[in-house]
Amino acid sequence: MSRILPAPWLSLFLLIVWLLLQNSVSFGLVVLGAILATAIPLYTFRARDFPLTIHRPGTAVVYFLVLLVDIVVSNIDIAKIILLPRKKIKPALIEYPLDLTNQVPITILACTITLTPGTVSAELSRDGNTLLIHALNVEDVDALIADIKQRYERRLKEIFQC
């Protein structure tokens, strides 16, 4: 590990993926791939400042599968809203109280909420205790908060022991 190449294995992997995505090998593609494979780890090196230990990898797999199912279900719900415009939508801004304390799990939760169609994580409060969420269609705010706590936040607390 050096200053120019902080993650040599990651750089090599990025170069190989770049060349596979291009489906050809030429001098220019190799040079551009090498530049990107060097620049991306340098640019993202600060993200390694956050120590991350996954205590329950099985729960992480379940979390990922739950997220995939929720993305599919949310896509179907959004398609219904678009295709059936008679359905009345009820948008809401929700102040979601966080039980998580570590920055990495909070970031993962915010990304999870944004990945599911119809919801967007808008802002984390300065004290880090509240996440502002915009939801496209909310029948019951308390039920949505309980659902996020049960489906996502509880699992993140188990995965990262925080």
Image (cartoon, rainbow, N blue to C red):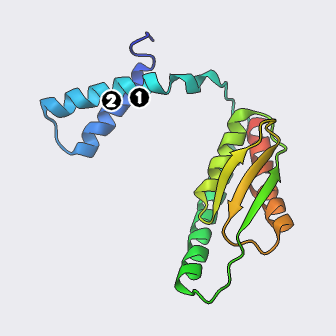
Position of residue 29 measured from the top left corner of the image (x, y, whole percent): 19, 34
Classed neighbour count for the residue bearing mark 2: other residues with Cα under 10 Å, few (<14), some (14–19), many (≥20):
some
Q: In this figure, which residue is indicated by the disc labeled 2?
A: 36
Would you place residue 139 above or below residue 92 in this image?
below
Q: Which of the numbered marks, if any, corresponds to residue 155? A: none
Position of residue 60 measured from the top left corner of the image (x, y, whole percent): 67, 45
Would you place residue 12 above or below residue 98 in this image?
above
Q: Which secondary structure, mark 2?
A: helix
Considering every residue shown, the one lying at the far top of the view is: 2
Q: In this figure, which residue is indicated by the disc labeled 1?
A: 40
Residue 73 quadrant: bottom right
Considering every residue shown, the one lying at the far left of the view is: 26
Three-letter amino acid code at the position of disc 1: Ile
Q: Which secondary structure, mark 1?
A: helix
Judged left or right of residue 135, residue 82 is: left
Image point 75% across, 36% down: which residue? Answer: 160
Q: The C terminus lies in which quarter of the figure?
A: top right
Image point 64% across, 64% down: which residue? Answer: 70
